[in-house]
Amino acid sequence: MTIAPQITKEMTWAKATTQTPFGAVSSDWRRSGRSVRLKAAVPVGATAKVVLPGEVGSTVLEAGQPAADADGVRDAVYENGSWTLTVGSGSYDFRVLPEADPERDVEASLTADEDQLNRGDSASGEITVSNTSPVDISDVTVEVSGDSLSFEDDELAVGDVAGDSEKAVKVKADVAVDAPMGALDVDVKVSFTAAGQPYSVTKTLPWVTVVSGVTLDQVQVGQLDEADGAKTVDVTAVVTNSSALPVTGSLPCNAPAGAPRPMPSRCLRGGALRSPRP
């Protein structure tokens, strides 16, 4: 039997179990950065070929030790971008580790406590620095900047991040009162030291979306009034401004298709909209 998971950039994990004449065989893989981990079970009396992708210079471990020296592993060969291992029955925990490349293995991600904010609001969230390499990194700092954002602290100290781990720091910023509607991005620069050498990684990440804060909550249409030879109808709209800033605007009222064409409407701020009709 062959266990050869099809690992793609679009997925970070997958697992499956199937029955064979020898018993159940299972595969459970997870991708973290450029490294791949596979937990596999081969039934008693069976032999399996395990195929895992790996870059040139990568190593493959089983339960933390070189796979070629592990119990049950009969052969481990690297060729054409893949590791092929021949194993007997048992449970295995394989991991393919690429050759250390800190600038490729250190990544930053950004989350928001609230996805949508009004102008003048405060945005908050977390920046997570992930180190997917086996090499520890130290003196990690994060610099942040972005249009229409005023950060409480634009340089954040993260400290040390061990290999195959991550660490998060809080981030907070005020949204400018004249910020444009729509998504606001943050430029993130991660600086760190690995094996005595300085490195930096820069990435632009989406964070929050600025909305107007204005909602139309309710519309009521009154009865047709034909007094004084004119046909009128009262339309009352309830508009809410959830932001801390005053807003101005208009609320046009258009007649439905087939109705007599209305005369120009008057938009009354904070009250009813009255539209005379011929």
Image (cartoon, rainbow, N blue to C red):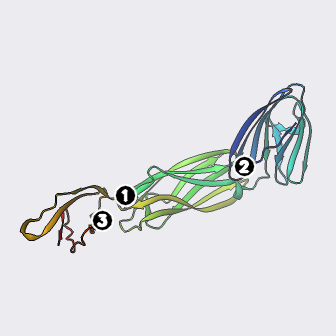
Looking at the image, which residue sits at the far bottom?
264
Q: List the residue tagged with mark 2.
A: 133
Expressed as whole percent of the image width and height from the top left, the position of residue 151 reads 45, 60
Name the N-terminal-most of marks 1 and 3: 1
Q: Amino acid at mark 1?
A: Asp
- The residue mark sitting in front, 3 or 2, is 3
Tally the marks: 3
- The residue mark sitting in front, 1 or 3, is 3
**Residue under the image location 42 percent in, 61 percent down:** 210
Expressed as whole percent of the image width and height from the top left, the position of residue 53 reads 81, 49
**3, 87: nearer the viewer:** 3
Q: Is residue 13 left or right of residue 186?
A: right
Q: Is residue 13 above or below residue 146?
A: above
Looking at the image, which residue sits at the far front?
258
Tell me how far mark 2 sits from mark 1, CA to CA.
38 Å
Indicate which disc residue 121 carries.
Answer: 1
- The residue mark sitting in front, 2 or 1, is 1
Indicate which disc residue 160 carries.
Answer: none
**261, 198: nearer the viewer:** 261
Q: Amino acid at mark 3?
A: Pro
Tell me how far mark 3 sits from mark 2, CA to CA.
63 Å
Q: Is residue 185 left or right of residue 248?
A: right
Image quarter hosting the N terminus? top right
Mark 2: few/some/many CA within 10 Å (<14, 14-19, 20+): many
Tell me how far mark 1 sits from mark 3, CA to CA.
38 Å
Q: List the residue tagged with mark 3.
A: 256
Name the N-terminal-most of marks 2 and 1: 1
**Residue under the image location 68 percent in, 48 percent down:** 11
